Each structure stands twice: as C-alpha cells, then as structure tokens.
Image: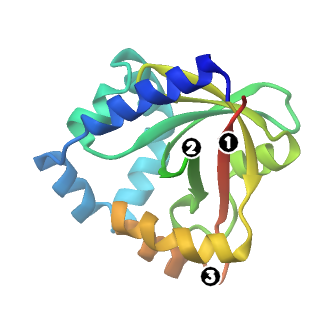
Amino acid sequence: MDDTTAARLGRVAEFEAARRATPVTRLLLTVGKTRGFARVYRALGPAVDPWALRRSRGKLASRVYGLPALLLTTIGRRSGEPRVSPLLYIRDGDDFVVVGTNFGQRHHPAWTANLIARPDAEIEVGPERLAVTGELVDDADWQRLWPRFVSVYPGYAGYLQRAGGRTPRMFALRPVR
C-alpha cells in the first residue's frame, strides 16, 4: 500500500473512532425496520444524504446518525454518468463492505449493476475520498459478513425477509493502492 493511501485510511480510522450512538441513532434503529421508513428514505435519502454528508464532511452520519455511512460513486452502466449512492458499510480489514438490500425490494439496486459493469469506483468516508475497486464477495464471506451488517443496522434483517428470496449483492470495496 502506498503512503498516501495508508495515510487516508488512517484518517478514516480516526473519523470512524469518533462515531457515537445518539438519540437519533436509536430512533433510526427502531423506525428503520419499518416499511414506511424504507419507503420514505428510498424517496428522500438518495437525494438529501449525499448533499448533507458532503456539506458536513461526513459529520452528519457520524455525529447525528451514529452509523457508518459512505458515499459510493459508480459510473452508470448505460448512461456513463457518475451516480452517487449513500450506503451503510462495515470494515473488513482495509476493505469497506457494502450490501445492496434495496430496502427489501425484489430487485437489486442500480448501483450494484453499475459496480459489476465497472468495478472502479470512488468512496467518500468522512473527509476522505478513496479510489476503490468493487468485488462481489463469495458465499462464504457473505455468510460471515451478513451478521455484522445486521448488528450495525437491524433493519437489514427485515429487508432480507421482504426481498422475496433475492440474496442482496455484497461488495468488498478495496482501496486502490
């Protein structure tokens, strides 16, 4: 790993260490499980969160939401245009792992198809931007990592139940070295 990437990952780790649960966190963990919240967030979150997270340099997610959130920029597989998706993540070593639950809908979110078509992407975590390569995780890693997602955000368990047998795509986002 080059020194620049290592330094950025160090700053991300410092940013992550400052994250704390808040009353808003408890509210999100409670209402986030509901279909109503999923419907509202699906309409508003992708438009509002990228602006708010960038404006606050990630502090909205860490200090208000208390959840590990990043912005993933993929390139649209048909449009060729950049597409930004706010996502929760977990860490697996240096990798940032994201999952395309699509709030329990029966189809995969568009960002997952974009990442399959063009694995080179960018993430923003707090004040840092990192070039990453997305790779679908294998079944063993999916089984190993899924419980960690549910522990971060219990609403994921309900999303999986509502997905109608669809297994959400999970990706390891590996910083480009």
Mark with earlier residue (3, 1): 3
Amino acid type of the residue that numbered disc 1 sits on in the rendered structure: Arg
Q: Residue at x 44, y 57 (%)?
A: 39
**Count of marks placed on residues:** 3
| Residue that label 1 marks | 174
35 with respect to 73 (left or right): left
Q: Residue at x 72, y 51 (%)?
A: 112
Q: Is residue 39 above or below residue 2?
A: below
Q: Position of residue 58 (x, y in %)?
A: 37, 26
Q: Is residue 167 visible?
A: no
Q: Is residue 159 above or below residue 59?
A: below
Mark with earlier residue (3, 2): 2
Q: CA distance from mark 3 to mark 2?
A: 32 Å
Q: Position of residue 86 (x, y in %)?
A: 51, 39
Q: Residue at x 29, y 30 (%)?
A: 60
- Mark 3 crowd level (few <14, some 14–19, many ≥20, 10 Å Cα): few
| Residue that label 3 marks | 164
Q: Residue at x 17, y 46 (%)?
A: 24
* Secondary structure under the numbered disc 3 in the rendered image: loop
| Residue that label 2 marks | 94
Q: Is residue 133 visible?
A: yes
Q: CA distance from mark 2 to mark 1?
A: 7 Å
The reply to whether the C-beta atoms of the residues labelled 2 and 1 are less than 8 Å apart is yes
135 with respect to 91 (left or right): right
